[in-house]
Amino acid sequence: MARTNEKVRYLQKSKHYTPAKHAEGAEKALKVLEGRWKMIIIFHLFTRPVLRFSELERAIPGVSQKMLIQQLRELERDGIVRRTVHPQVQPNVEYDLTKLGRALCPALDALLEWGELRQSSSKEGG
């Protein structure tokens, strides 16, 4: 059986490698994605690169307008989502993923694969 440090070799490339440092970094990354609706918003923006606020609101039927605004503001503050306001008679607000937000795609794909693996192994009994 391989040891954890053998499986996660890339962590040791850092001169200041410590498991606690990397755990802290992972916690900070997960904190950005923490929130009932953030992952759903991000996955909708992977599917359709630019969405208006009203389109997001319709795409996520269980979210209140207040909560959607709050989650979008947090994603914007963290540099994941970009908000663009088109000044018109009725302002048009669009959201898209930033370069940093698009960079989440491989990590979220890996997380989905892990979730599927976990689900299939729990059905098999271990």
Image (tube, rainbow, N blue to C red):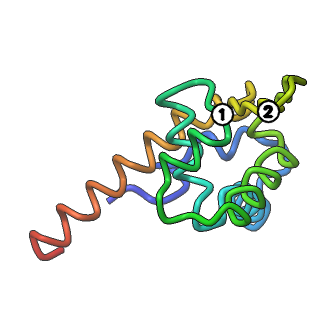
Percent across and percent down for residue 64 are: 62, 66
Residue 53 on image: x %, y %:
67, 41
Q: Is residue 75 visible?
A: yes
Residue on which the image places disc 1: 52
Q: Is residue 34 left or right of residue 116?
A: right
Would residue 116 appear left or right of 39 to someone viewing this image?
A: left
- Relative height, residue 73 to residue 93 (above, below): below
Q: Position of residue 33 (x, y in %)?
A: 66, 57
Occupied quadrant, residue 104: top right
- Of 29 and 42, nearer the camera is 42
Please, which residue is most extreme toward the left here?
124
Name the residue located 9 percent from the left edge and 69 percent from the top edge.
Answer: 124
Q: CA distance from mark 1 to mark 2?
A: 12 Å
> Is residue 70 rendered to the left or right of residue 40?
right
Amino acid marked by disc 1 = Arg
Q: Secondary structure at mark 1?
A: strand
Q: Residue at x 69, y 29 (%)?
A: 96
